[in-house]
Image (cartoon, grey):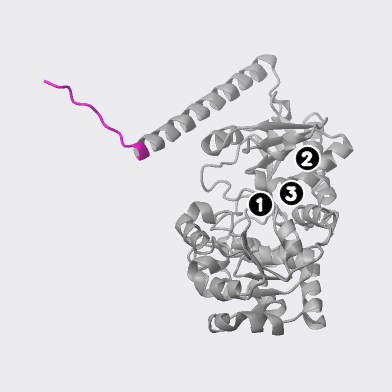
Amino acid sequence: MMPHLLYIDPGTGSMLFSIFIGIAATLFFFAKAAILKLVVFVSGKRSGIQQDASYKPYVVYVEGKQYWNVFKPIVDEFEKRQLPLTYYTSAEDDSIFDTTYTYVHAEYIGKGNAAFAKLNMLSAGIVVMTTPGLNVYQLKRSKNVRFYANILHGASDPTMMKWYGLDFFDAILLTGDYQRTDLRMLEQKRKIPAKQLPTIGCTYLDALQQKMDSIPVETPHQFTVLVSPSWGPSSLLSKYGTALLDPLVATGWNIIIRPHPQSKRAEPEVIETLTQTYQNAKNVTWDYSRDNIIVMKKADIMISDFSAIIYDYTFLCDKPVMYVNADLDLRPYDAYELDNHGKDIWQFRVLKEMGIELKQEQFANIKTIIEQASDNEHLHALRQKAKSEAWMHIGHAAENAVNFMIDTVKSFEQAKDTHNEQKHA
């Protein structure tokens, strides 16, 4: 009689393997932490977090290679000040490994559960990250970390994070003062403790500005339209597709289509269909480069939807933007809990002022619409106003971020010294 064989389909097997790796990583770091605690106990050093043998005063966690522009200015500032910084990354090919630093220690800690297992048992003074969802999903607050700060990687509304994305941080490092109002409103509505909300500027835009200034102007230059949408069912490519692209391609202008990085993973069939449709169109280019500054520099006008790239393009290039008003469902976002369910948040209000709305019934006549939507001093003034509100302390964000990190850790040390003095008085 043939023995019964257990069959596991490839999908289930992959999931079980992932769970096994996550459990193994968790057990490894738990054992490592237990050994360190034993060493501390045996040595009699039990007087505080800073006595932990694995303690690191300053830590940044980088979720992916795409966030290098956010952290490079901070890394360079630590190096300039000759201060130790621990740089944990979930990108094996992180750009930091291409540069030699003396005071910055970079370490690849794996992806997903493996990375979270290490971070959840970390001993540190302050940890700074772009990753949302602290204490919501797998990423938990370590009891041996004194302070968590989230640094915004764009100049748009932080309430456009998924629900509770920023609630459990001790601080949010803002790019502009305007962001503070809605975050305070969320705290009040949810009855959670008030966070520190310093406005430091935008390290990401500071880094991109330096890169963009180094790119020469392309001559001779053909009129170029950059189509750069967000992703999901409400996004421009998913919702309109060929209805918008057909008349654009027919203009004969240079058309650059830059899908959101998430599109290839979340909606591959949409991208594949459109790529096949325009594979023989000589004036169409698909751009998937990591940095978007080269295509932004080339473009004379951008067409988008609700993507935050609108603000990168506006603030860095000071060129007109056209937007298709998609009916974005705000229910999965923090903004939905604000007054009027978030429909009046800064980025939507400002876009209506400085952007040019493109309606679906205008698609067929898009060449004339774009030609008539020429830039003017009024739009320029509105773009400059928005930039001054959303991107403050231009060129000084890294300096401000590092000052905040240093001051935060110093405050712990001073509080500890005061406690010890009172204890022995």
Q: Which residues are magenta?
A: 1-11
User: Which residue is tagged 1?
Assistant: 289
Question: Horizontal and vertical percent for residue 8?
Answer: 30, 34
Of the residues shown, which amino acid type is indicated by label 1? Ser
Mark 2 vs mark 1: which is more N-terminal? Answer: 1
Of the residues shown, which amino acid type is indicated by label 2? Val
Marking on residue 69: 3
- Near-viewer residue (308 or 52): 308
Identify the secondary structure beneath mark 2: helix
Mark 3 vs mark 1: which is more N-terminal? Answer: 3
Left or right: 81 in relation to 380:
right
Real-space Cα distance between discs 2 and 1? 38 Å
| Occupied quadrant, residue 180 | bottom right
In the picture, which quadrant includes the C terminus? top right
Query: Can residue 184 be seen by looking at this rendering?
Result: no
Real-space Cα distance between discs 3 and 1? 14 Å
Q: Residue furthest right?
A: 81
Left or right: 53 in relation to 243:
right
Of the residues shown, which amino acid type is indicated by label 3? Asn
Q: Nearer the viewer, mark 3 or mark 2?
A: 3
Mark 3 vs mark 2: which is more N-terminal? Answer: 3
Q: Residue at x 74, y 81 (%)?
A: 374
Query: Can residue 199 be seen by looking at this rendering?
Result: yes
Q: Any magenta on residue 46?
A: no
Real-space Cα distance between discs 3 and 2? 24 Å
CB atoms of marks 3 and 1 within 8 Å: no
Marking on residue 409: 2
Q: Residue at x 58, y 71 (%)?
A: 342
Neighbour class for label 2 at 10 Å: few (<14), some, many (≥20)?
Answer: some
Question: Horizontal and vertical percent for residue 400?
Answer: 83, 51
Q: Nearer the viewer, mark 2 or mark 1?
A: 1
Total marks shown come to 3
